[in-house]
Amino acid sequence: MFKEKQKTAFSGWAALVSLIVALGLTVYWFVMQIIDLNQGNPASPLELVGNIVLFVGLLVTMHGFFTIEPNEAIVLLLFGRYIGTEKTTGFRWANPFYTRKPISLRVRNFDSEKLKVNDKRGNPIDISAVVVWRVSDTAQAVFEVENYTEYVRMQSESALRHLATQYAYDSSEHEEVSLRVSIDEVSEALGKEIQERVKRAGVVIEEARINHLAYAAEIASVMLQRQQAEAIIAARQKIVDGAVGMVQMALERLSTEGVLHLDEERKATMVSNLMVVLCAERAAQPVLNTGSLY
């Protein structure tokens, strides 16, 4: 596996000044040879050839200049061999025969396609996620995978599809992790799974979070009715629990404070009436007995 190596290039400004001086001296030398030739003092063929080669070589070195923007890196190769990565911002110069591959180190993000998958209970759902990532190892990103951007996208969607099958869409049990209720836990698990899949590409996942979650269209209406029924049942359970507690408290206080002494039959009647009043969906309309209690 490739690992990133730091390669420091030369300052472009220092190299530019040196190149200008060298070109000036080469041109001056060439002009002096022409003057000597006109005066009948021709230079040796070796000097002429050397001057031409030097001039061409200086022109070739001009290809070694390049610039690096903030949060950008340049991967340097020499005839197919990895030399290193230059990350120093600014105007730089390196071997003109280096092949330079620019790569961005900025934080990126994308919204995955809406995937139709089955959750843990087999219900079809539509799900998508937002993934925030950046390149941390330029050598792995360039040499380990064909296209690291597409690789991250495909692996993220694959991880999202796998994760959706591990959890139920919703749960009436609070202790059970579900896609809808436990967003933070599910997002953390999603980020870890994506990171495990893309680490070969030298990529770091900054954040992964579910962006869209819904039942598939073919079962959406049925599941909505189911959710409503579960909500009604849960509400009724709370109402009954509260009513039982209130009736028990009323009987205990009446007995303790000696306000009223009731036999078992009247207690049962009182409990029945209180439960009806406390559990009814509408306000109670009592019938007043103006006669004897007996």
Image (cartoon, grey):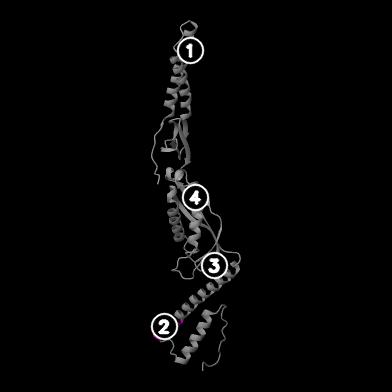
Alpha carbon of mark 2 to alpha carbon of mark 3: how far? 51 Å
| Amino acid type of the residue tagged 2 in the rendering | Arg
Quickly name the residue at label 4.
151
Q: Secondary structure at mark 1?
A: helix
Residue 86 quadrant: top left
Q: Which residues are magenta?
A: 247-257
Number of the label disc, if any, that sits on residue 58? none
- Which of the marked residues, 2 or 1, is nearer the chain's N terminus? 1
Quickly name the residue at label 2.
253
- Contact between labelled residues 3 and 4, with CB atoms less than 8 Å apart: no
Q: Secondary structure at mark 2?
A: helix
Label 3 neighbour load within 10 Å: few <14, some 14-19, many 20+: some
Quickly name the residue at label 1.
31
Task: Please identify the residue farthest to the top as the structure is shown.
Answer: 39
- Contact between labelled residues 1 and 2, with CB atoms less than 8 Å apart: no
| Amino acid type of the residue tagged 1 in the rendering | Val
Q: Main secondary structure of the magenta part?
A: helix
Quickly name the residue at label 3.
123
